[in-house]
Image: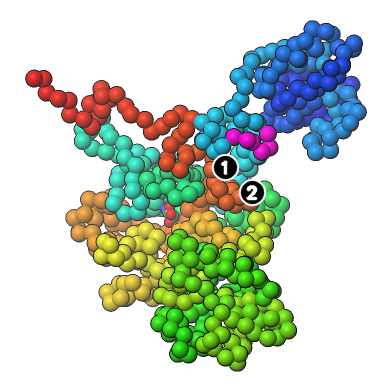
């Protein structure tokens, strides 16, 4: 028998029991006559105890030869500890050893396996099995497991079927770049790994399955911006005979259920905001609404007073940082440097200090009278003690820059507590997005998204203005997921493809199966997909998804542990028709 109990199980009430435990040696503390070992497994840490004179000498000798991460089996009696550790669940007891057996030795690990490791990212990824032994990682994966079980419980209770869809599918030119897999049996042809099961879940609706879900791996060969993984997991869902409202309610219900189950937290009903409002008030389609600081536009008040920067700008817009009028020169310079960073790209920052004594002072005093500045303060709803921060320039880029500044101020003022959750639906996204480079429209969500009925006529006159029945779930400024009501009419779907620059033939080649299916009684349907890695990280209060995935890839898309991608042998290349063998001379 390897164990009677786990290392996280024993309590004071177990005192006197003879037990056997197995696990890894976290550390050995040798005080000469007294010796302690911390024994660790997935469930926790239990202290083992040996004493010169009382314990057998060979036991003490065996304990002294242990190193970190050795695997041992021990037996002994549970006893009350003299100095208790309130920080761990087993902290009131220790095991007085009567036997100790080495099951396996370990090399010295290249980094410490503690709450906080001293290993760098790459090293920890190379030795992922050691990193995964650390408590924070274990907690993350435990949370992920719990969430996946509760997701299934919720969706099952709502009548969803979990149905698997294939991983070897067909490459399509829309969306991100595909990962492709050569087909040995079909020389010169390739499968693609799914960017999402989108078309399959729609086909399942045509097939009458009514409610589908899958916790599914998706693959996108995108340039890896920080914290993107080439393979990631979605909670992918589709429903038939539903309106947008039905979908929002179902998945708001799911998110609330999950927060309740894993955090004991009622996050309350979701706020709602349409895309146009989100852009106008926050300069972002995923606003963090844990704090206000909404955008205030000043064109009518700030232009035409001789300040060329404003006069030439398409938009003058700012935020009110409440209580910040005492910001020092250095702090203000810091903010100016922040907005001028190349990633943000503003030319400069104008500030107005509404001092506590009621006086007003700005960085553009030369051009604006106190009265004018008071007029601005009024528009901002500013009080004495506040600081107004103003940007100007091209409309779209200025809003984006101010969004960054707003988030930075949120950080500086401690308004973005990761343990506070403010969920939001952003709705009515534009259907299409113009791409300058390609000189054509792209679907903002994907080509299967339905325009709003009242906007269908715009497809003929002004497609860029058409809004979609598309929505995103946003929590704390993070896009947790998105979806849409789909087109279920063949003619409208073909029209959509042609707007996206597909010829009839191309559309038929790429998506013929879907267009054909739409001729056999496709029900109205819609769905959503939530980023499962991201949702898990968010619920835990973290930005980065990497440590919520057991075996993630690094920023260059490499798996450091198995060292992949890697070259393959010529024979394998030949077999896959990826390399023509040189003909014999
Ligand atoms: N397939 C979409 C995505 O991956 C989600 C959806 O529309 O359901 O973003």
In depth, the one of 498 and 319 nearer the eye is 319
Q: Which residue is mark 1?
A: 548
Residue 356 position, x and y percent, is: 72, 81
553 above or below 412?
above
Q: What secondary structure prevails in the magenta region?
A: loop
Residue 6 position, x and y percent, is: 73, 26
Residue 241 position, x and y percent, is: 45, 60
In depth, the one of 413 and 10 nearer the eye is 413
Quadrant, the C terminus: top left
- Cβ–Cβ below 8 Å for labels 1 and 2? yes
464 above or below 160?
below
- Earlier sequence position, callout 1 versus callout 2: 2
The secondary element bearing badge 2 is classed as helix
In depth, the one of 404 and 215 nearer the eye is 404
Residue at 87% across / 33% down in the picture?
84
385 above or below 479?
below
Q: Residue furthest left?
A: 585
Determine if residue 4 is in view.
no
Residue at 38% across / 48% down in the picture?
222
- Which region of the structure is painted magenta? 114-119
Determine if residue 367 is in view.
yes
Q: Is mark 1 within 8 Å of ligand 1?
A: no
Q: Residues within 10 Å of mark 1 (few under 14, many from 20)?
A: many
Q: Which residue is mark 2?
A: 540
Rounded to the nearest angstrom, the CA distance separating label 1 from label 2 is 9 Å
Instruction: Judge left or right: residue 274 versus residue 465.
Output: right
């Amino acid at each position: 028998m390897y164990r009677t109990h786990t290392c996280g199980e024993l309590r004071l009430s177990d005192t006197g029991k003879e037990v056997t435990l197995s696990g890894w040696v976290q550390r050995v503390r040798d005080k000469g006559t007294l010796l302690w070992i911390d024994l660790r497994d997935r469930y926790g840490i239990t202290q083992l105890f040996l004493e010169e004179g009382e314990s057998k000498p060979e036991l003490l000798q065996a304990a002294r030869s242990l190193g970190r991460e050795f695997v041992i089996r021990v037996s002994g009696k549970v006893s009350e500890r003299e100095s208790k550790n309130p920080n761990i669940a087993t902290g009131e007891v220790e095991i007085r050893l009567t036997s100790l057996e080495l099951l396996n030795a370990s090399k010295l690990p290249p980094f410490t396996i503690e709450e906080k490791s001293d290993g760098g990212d790459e090293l920890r990824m190379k030795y992922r099995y050691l990193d995964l032994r650390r408590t924070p990682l274990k907690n993350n994966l435990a949370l992920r497991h719990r969430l996946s079980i509760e997701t299934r419980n919720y969706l099952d209770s709502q009548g969803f079927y979990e149905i698997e869809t294939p991983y070897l599918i067909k490459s399509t030119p829309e969306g991100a770049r595909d990962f492709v897999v050569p087909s040995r049996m079909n020389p010169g042809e390739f499968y693609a790994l799914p960017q999402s099961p989108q078309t399959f879940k729609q086909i399942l609706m045509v097939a009458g399955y009514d409610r589908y879900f899958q916790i599914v791996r998706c693959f996108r060969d995108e340039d890896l911006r920080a914290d993107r993984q080439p393979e990631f997991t979605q909670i992918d869902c589709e429903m038939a005979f539903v309106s947008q409202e039905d979908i929002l309610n179902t998945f708001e219900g799911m998110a609330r259920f999950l927060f309740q189950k894993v955090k004991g937290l009622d996050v309350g009903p979701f706020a709602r905001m349409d895309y146009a409002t989100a852009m106008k008030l926050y300069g972002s389609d995923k606003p963090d609404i844990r704090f206000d600081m909404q955008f205030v536009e000043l064109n009518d008040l700030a232009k035409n007073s001789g300040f060329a920067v404003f006069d030439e700008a398409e938009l003058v817009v700012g935020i009110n940082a409440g209580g910040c009028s005492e910001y020092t020169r250095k702090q203000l310079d810091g903010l100016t440097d922040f907005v001028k960073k190349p990633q943000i790209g503003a030319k400069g920052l104008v500030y107005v200090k509404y001092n506590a004594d009621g006086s007003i002072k700005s960085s553009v005093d030369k051009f604006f009278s106190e009265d004018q500045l008071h007029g601005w303060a009024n528009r901002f709803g500013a009080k004495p003690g506040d600081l107004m921060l103003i940007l100007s320039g091209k409309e779209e880029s200025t809003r984006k820059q101010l969004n960054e500044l707003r988030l930075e101020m949120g950080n500086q003022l401690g308004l973005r507590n990761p343990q506070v959750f403010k969920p939001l639906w952003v709705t009515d996204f534009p259907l299409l997005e113009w791409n300058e480079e390609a000189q054509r429209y792209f679907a903002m969500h994907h080509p299967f998204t339905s325009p709003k009925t009242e906007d269908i006529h715009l497809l003929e006159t002004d497609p860029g203005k058409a809004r979609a029945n598309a929505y995103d779930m946003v929590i704390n400024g993070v896009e947790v997921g998105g979806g849409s009501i789909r087109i279920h009419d063949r003619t409208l779907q073909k029209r959509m493809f042609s707007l996206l620059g597909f010829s009839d033939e191309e559309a038929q080649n790429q998506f013929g199966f879907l267009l054909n299916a739409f001729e056999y009684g496709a029900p109205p349907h819609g769905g959503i997909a939530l980023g499962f890695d991201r949702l898990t990280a968010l619920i835990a209060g973290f930005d980065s998804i990497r440590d919520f995935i057991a075996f993630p890839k690094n920023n260059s898309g490499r798996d450091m542990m198995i060292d992949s991608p890697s070259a393959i042998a010529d024979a394998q290349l030949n077999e896959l028709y990826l390399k023509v063998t040189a003909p014999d001379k």
